[in-house]
Amino acid sequence: MAEINGGRMVVNALEKEGVTHVFSISGGHIAPIYDALLESDIKLVTTRHEQAAAMMAGGWARTTGEPGVCIVTAGPGFTNAITGMADAHMACAPVVCIAGTVATDMSDRLDLQDLNQLDMMKPITNWARTVIKTARIPESIHEAFKQARGGSPGPVFLEVPADILGRKIEDSKVVPAEPIARPRPGLAPEELDKVVEMIRSSKKPILIAGSGVYYARGAEDLVRFAEKAKIPTFTTGLGKGCISDDHPLGYGTSMALKPGAAMAALTQADLIFLLGTRISLFFLYGRVFNPAAKMIHLNIDPVELGRNRVPDLGLVADAGRAVSQLADAAEGEVDPAAFDEWRATLDQAHKSAMEFFRPQIETDEMPMHPLRLCKEVEDFLGPDDIMALDGGDTQIWMGMVRSNFKPGTTLESGLFGCLGVGIPFGVAAALANPDRNVCVFIGDGSVGFNFMELHTALCQGVNLTVVINNDNAWGMVKHSQMLSYGPERTCGVELGDVPYHKMLEGLGGWATEVNKPDEVRPALEEARKQGGVCMINAHVKPGVVSPGSIALANIGKEGGGL
């Protein structure tokens, strides 16, 4: 009988799950996995920090819709990954984290890097387990992927003790296991009838599609449903781009901070249909919705129904399957002209908001306004190009001008508000999409978190352009301090003029520095021409207060200060 060790079992199971890339830093407790990867087609992407490995796995999940995989060693390798896992947890991003740990007979004996890892991971994962027998490693890997994909997607954690991982057993003793298909519960006929009736009875309906639609591969059916029901459709999270912003029924992000029709829609609609999203801060905990509106809330996680607002109709289903069913059910059931007047109202609201906003984004003032920088970058990018966002004010500014024409083209932290994700997300997106252009738009504070992952990008040979929105400060925090305590009482927020572009040049990338609006596009064109890892260090006007800074100043006040 042939023998097989635990490391080979891990790699074999990953191959069966269709994994092509893993993100990791080596360590003694995971050495058998590394040894097995030498004989695998899976690409090992070695990062400079385990935080970045977990974030790259999260970026992979966001850009592909499939679980990203990080492999970390015990103790500090594990703890370094926690922030990336917490970010994935808040964003419902499917990440599989595999960690080594001390041998089973050495636990609690003060062995090197001994730590109760499992209990630390349980609160920030969908599922966390320890493998207790070498023969059960493949079974545990496939269960981990099922848990990451199934129900509400999210991160999972599997630790394998060093002795379990390194042990050899006869392959006939391995517990048989295979990948498990993602369950896709749908809607009952009476539920479909109720939704169609509520739409037909409304005069001002809106649909808001979230990440659940994206991960369930429901983009095409979302468009089909919107067209059959003639419903104005907004998006949030990774739902952005599931219906193009230039579609006649696509009104862009539901975030009211972005100039457009969102505020008018949220406050005036008489029917709000939330599809695969949650009622969170991004909807002001439900307070932004018209209190008199009826609400339909569909989510695969029943826990989300009733959070912050009780829906008139709560539905538990896979958003992708449900929206396909709804598109079929709506066929011929809604008068094509029923909501013409409502859409005209939203079109006018969008037009008025953009006319008011246009002078701010087209300003030639010097120093350069951050919104003008955002506009120059956004105008340069094509509909297939991917943007990873990172930073406080930086994300707010770009969110005010960013348009999405295809799913998975804007990658951001989400509710965890995690700085440092931009470069890891960008590297993962570039690896997953080698034929597409990837841009990281990042603040000068955020760029310091995982700067050395640009070395990872260089080693991997990817094409990646980093644009730094540089105001020489932790802008959002500085501005919130000014609002709360006065302009003379800011503390710990100055960064100074750091030559980030020269730092990248030192690593071997191409970089430049810009100060004027008319310098931005030529720099982007040159970066595209150069290829590889490029950087544009763009200096913007300090002290410009974003709506995000105002919100941050309200943290700690009752009800979020809202």
Image (tube, rainbow, N blue to C red):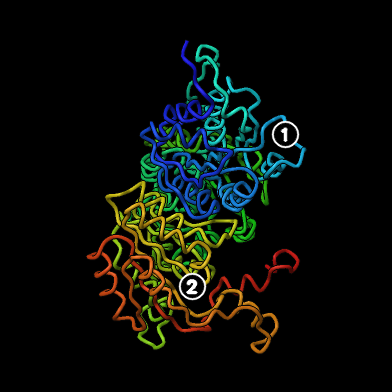
Q: Position of residue 320 (x, y in %)?
A: 45, 37
Q: Nearer the viewer, mark 1 or mark 2?
A: 1
Position of 83 compared to 520: left or right?
A: right
Q: Please report the residue visible at 48 percent of the width from the left and 34 percent of the height from the top.
A: 322
Q: Name which quarter of the figure residue 385 lies in.
A: bottom left
Q: Position of residue 334 (x, y in %)?
A: 41, 41
- Mark 1, residue position: 106
Q: Position of residue 33 (x, y in %)?
A: 50, 34
Circle number at residue 444: 2
Report the Cα–Cα distance between label 1 and label 2. Answer: 44 Å
Secondary-structure class at tag 2: loop
Q: Is residue 402 above or below residue 164?
A: below
Label 1 amino acid?
Answer: Met
Mark 1 nearby-residue class (10 Å; few <14, some 14–19, many ≥20): some
Q: Is residue 300 above or below residue 172?
A: below
Q: Is residue 438 above or below residue 133?
A: below
Label 2 amino acid?
Answer: Asp
Query: Which of the marked residues, 1 or 2, is nearer the chain's N terminus?
Result: 1
